[in-house]
Amino acid sequence: MNANPRISIVVLTYNRADELMGVLHSLQALPERPEIIVVDNASTDGTADRVRAEHPQVRLVREPTNRGAAGRNSGVAQVRTPYVAFCDDDTWWAPGALARAADLLDAHPRVAALNARVIVEPEGRTDPTCDVMAHSPLDARGLPGPALVGFMAGAVVMRTTAFLEAGGYEPRFFLGAEEALLAFDLQARGWALCYRHDMVTHHHPSPARDLHRRRASLIRNRLWLAWLRLPLAVAWDETRSVMRDARQQGLRREGLRAAMAGLPWVLRQRRVLPQQVVRDWWLVHRGGALAADAPSTPVVAQRQ
């Protein structure tokens, strides 16, 4: 039985059965005793069989194909609690973190997502991204922590209704900047995102990663993100910035070709963010105020 009916955990996994078993052991030992939902992204290493045999209390969702980050959508569709925590097969929540998150979300109905402090193992150091979040320049009045324009997909607790309202993760992004698009769409609906230093999750990076594919996908997705949601002038500036990064990584041609292949879809789905969301994003990513006369386009109604 779920001892804390306010929160569940969705764990995304793909071909990391050994690592997942350790993560599930840690999650099942949490004092909050949340319901755990594992989304298996069509693993071929026996992951599903091992979950059933070694962790029968866990709810298992098997995807017919590897959907990348969008596999989390299938997990959230099974959630019956007002809040959902996310982790991957190489991350796990610290005792008490989820109860703290639920208390904060109860007290702050405007907040959609709380990003935790990530402890990178085995060194036991704080992820540098969290240090950046802790010093966010955005106005956080009335919020339970520093205001954010984004979050870390495997280290966040979210309001279930907000996730569903924003449509979850875009399947076309697969992996790489997928949380940035969801963060944009949450903020476009008036939701706030925050960082909490006293909520802790642990991350032991898996060596089983295709880094070249990840980097190429990230270039493509950063371009798509700019073209999907930013005003033209800002999107053009971001495109130049992304292409500079791509050139340094030797991925300019590959990333641009992949992004252009999706251009018809991007143009159909383009919905420019409210001006304040764009200004906050600019302040965080460019370190200065966006010019008052910067071109902007009214936000278009979100398609469901």
Image: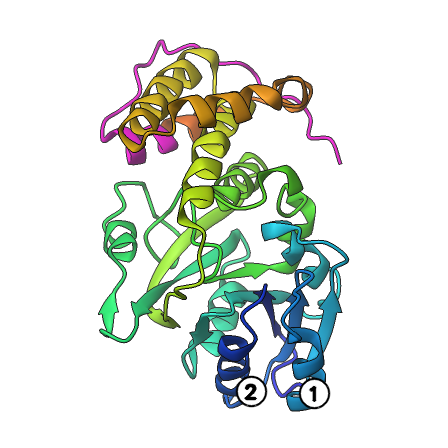
Q: Residue at x 29, y 53 (%)?
A: 129
Residue 15 sits above or below residue 226 on the image: below
Residue 24 horizontal/vertical position (percent): 55, 82
Q: Which quadrant of the structure image shows residue 56?
A: bottom right
Secondary element type, mark 2: helix
Residue 34 location, quadrant: bottom right
Q: In the rendering, at what x and y percent does residue 116 appear? A: 39, 64
**Residue sitting at x 58%, y 39%:** 173
Residue drawn at (53%, 51%) of the image? 110
Specify the segment rendered in magenta.
Answer: 280-304
Q: Quadrant of the N terminus?
A: bottom right
Q: Judge by depth and name the residue closer to the eye, 112 or 170.
A: 170
Q: Which residue is mark 1?
A: 57
CB within 8 Å, label 1 to label 2: yes
Element assignment for label 1: loop
Q: Which secondary structure is most common in the magenta stretch?
A: loop
Mark 2 neighbour class, 10 Å CA radius: few under 14, some 14 to 19, many 20 or more: some
Residue holding disc 2: 28
In the rendered structure, which amino acid carries the disc numbered 2? Answer: Gln
